[in-house]
Image: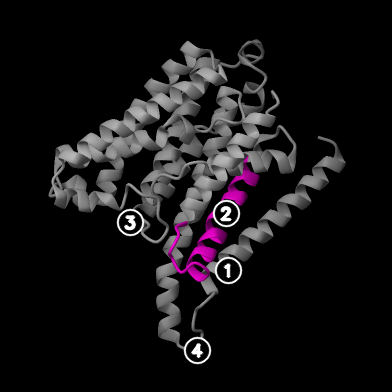
Amino acid sequence: MNNRAHGRNLRRLAVLVLLAVLAAAAYMLVGVKFSNEKLFLYAMHIRAPKLAAMVITAFAIGGASLVFQSVINNTIVTPCLLGMNSLYTLIHTAVVFFAGSGSLLAVNANASFAVDLVIMAVAATLIYSYFFKKTNHNVLYVLLIGTVLTSFFSSIQSTLVRVMDPNEYDNLLSTLVASFSNINSEIIVFSLIVLAAVIVVLRKDLALLNVLTLGKDQAINLGVDYDNCIRRLLLGVTLCIAVATAMVGPISFLGLIIANLSRQLLKTYRHGWLILGSVLFGVIVLVGGQVIVEHVYTYSIPVSVFITVGGGVYFLYLLLTRQRV
């Protein structure tokens, strides 16, 4: 990257940081009564965990989507499009179904999250590693498999819900629909620990992303243990998606939107820049969107609806105008 492009990207990232800070400030301060100290502190107590959850979600989905696209060497496929959200929802439903609403896993959010996380990590790594190897990362086959897996996981999950006790379903329902008004704030600390562990453990693999995008043969020639590196990165992606889904529910197309906006804005192959841009776009979209939902639409339309509709249109646009990278 030459000095001019480097400076341009720094300026663009600075603008994104400013917009993200403004969105966060608006979410925390708009509609707050500063004259009443008790009401002000109460508002901060309610809003601060939600803001933290949205930032964590943006980080998890933004980073995971960029890494995943580099793993399969395609810029229009994200973990959510391949059914990882549906897989997590199925696993969580199955845990509640078989353990029961009165069990420790249903009562303790951290215990439930830990069990979901372990099962999700093992299942997703095995399933997606196998299919990626069989399809040789062909985008059409990958998308087809993703569509089939999403329907398959959703069908099993729907079957479990239909035969589930109504009281257990009521407890489960809040986790099946993406909502930033009903955030699972109990697992914020646990989620931060998981994300920090992913970054620390996979730091060497993350540093190889620029090499992995050159292709398998070139990466192996440069001394990369390609298959094991891909497997570890896929595990990290799975954990990040699980964290985001557990915290706010499944959000389709968010990763697609923010990852590709980052690529289009920064126009670089340096993943450190791209991941940072994707995370900042995620914060702007989620926090800014939630401000609009709360103060313009007065909670009548969840932000996930706008993301899904806009993401679907954006996906078609990328699919029709796609160029190989």
For mark 3, what is the residue?
186
Q: Type of residue at label 3?
A: Glu
Asked whether residue 62 appears in the rendered view, the answer is: no
Q: Please identify, in this view, whether the residue under mark 4 or under mark 2 is nearer the observer.
A: 2
Mark 1 lies on a secondary structure that is: helix
Q: Are marks 2 and 3 in contact (CB under 8 Å)?
A: no
Report, in whole angstroms, how far the alpha carbon at label 2 lies from the one at label 3.
23 Å
Disc assigned to residue 285: 2
For mark 4, what is the residue?
35
For mark 1, what is the residue?
25
Mark 2 lies on a secondary structure that is: helix
Mark 4 lies on a secondary structure that is: loop
Which label's residue is closer to the chain start, 1 or 2?
Answer: 1
Q: Residues within 10 Å of mark 4 (few under 14, many from 20)?
A: few
Mark 3 lies on a secondary structure that is: helix
Q: How many marks?
A: 4
